[in-house]
Amino acid sequence: NLQKSGRQTKVLVAFSDLDFSYTDQRLLFSHISGEIHKGNKIGLLGLNGVGKTTLLKLIKGDLLPTAGKMKTAENLQIQYFSQKRDELDVETTPYELLGDGNDFVALPDGSKKHVISYFESFLFDRDDIHRPLKTFSGGEKSRLQLAFNLTKPGDILIFDEPTNDLDLETIQILEEKLSLFPGAVILISHDRAFLSTVTNKVWLIEDQGLQNFEGGYEQVSPYLEALEIEKELKENTKEASLPPAAPVVSPAKGPNNNKNKLRLETLYKDIEATEDKVKIIEEKIAGLDYTKLADPKNGELKILTDAQAILEERLLTLYQELEELENNT
């Protein structure tokens, strides 16, 4: 039931050199630029408090930038799926919410569907159609809001943590519909599998800037891994340049030998996981556009090479432990 609005405009939103700060003078963004095109499925990532929700409010027009330019297509239709479910009146019923008091739901493509059939298509029991929303669980309310939002046409659909409280079957339905949706989608989510399946572009907010990854979540994933390792390094400055390595188990005979065997099992997994991370980062480094690395804002190469060195040191430590355990087990 996801339908585009019929708009032919390719560029839906464009902003350049955007600054924003609240009245307390706390600067959230500095000279950020970006565009939203039809067909973009954008994952909006960043730590809590960096301004993800603020950027969405700027795009929606709820806030005005402190400086810079923000241009949106004329009569742009944006549908916002709030994590807080704040648009649901808990005293109403699904029948009243979805059908607006009518037996049929008007869908964006101009067709109509009986309210009970529409309700059931979101994995509800028809007997619950007249239950007040205050008796529904958090997951059921999430599904209801999803059903409600998808009755409205939009150029851009914005979802804030859409998979929270949703069961796997509903998530799979949502993934499929969003992937096929011809308009633009913006997702704030911590669900890596969901982001990987749906997105074809990622915006990462950090250090008051906005980084654009055109390859979607698969492209940004090793970069996020590198940032995590860099953060770990900063938190462990007293440990030379290495984060805490896996504890080395002293070789032992007799009863403690079983502990060594158990450690061996986890050690193999640790080594495999670390080798996979090294491979991903190596592929990421190889795929960098070196013509753009002169840009002072581009710290991706340094972060990735630092992460590579850290992981290789960690691998060496794990290999040494493995050799000791295999010789004494």
Image (cartoon, helix red, strand yellow):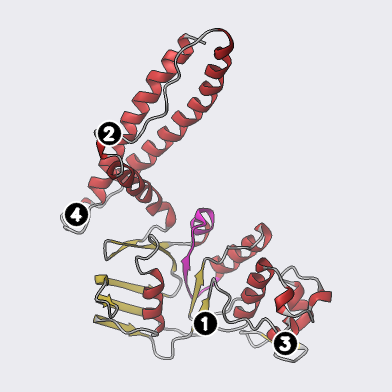
Task: Say if mark 4 contacts mark 1, CB within 8 Å.
Answer: no
Amino acid type at mark 1: Gly
Q: Residue at x 37, y 65 (%)?
A: 49
Q: Which residue is mark 4?
A: 291
Residue 216 to residue 251: above or below: below
Image quadrant containing the N terminus: bottom right
Q: What range of the chain is rendered magenta?
A: 181-196
- Residue 313: percent from left, percent from top: 31, 29
Q: Which mark is residue 154?
A: 1
Q: Residue at x 53, y 8 (%)?
A: 253
Amino acid type at mark 4: Thr
Task: Say if mark 2 contacts mark 1, CB within 8 Å.
Answer: no
Relative depth, front residue between 142 and 119: 142
Q: Which residue is mark 2?
A: 239
Give the number of callouts.
Answer: 4
Res 297 quadrant in image: bottom left
**Upstream in the sequence, badge 2 or badge 1?**
1
Spatial CA distance of label 1 from label 3 is 22 Å
Q: Secondary structure at mark 1?
A: loop
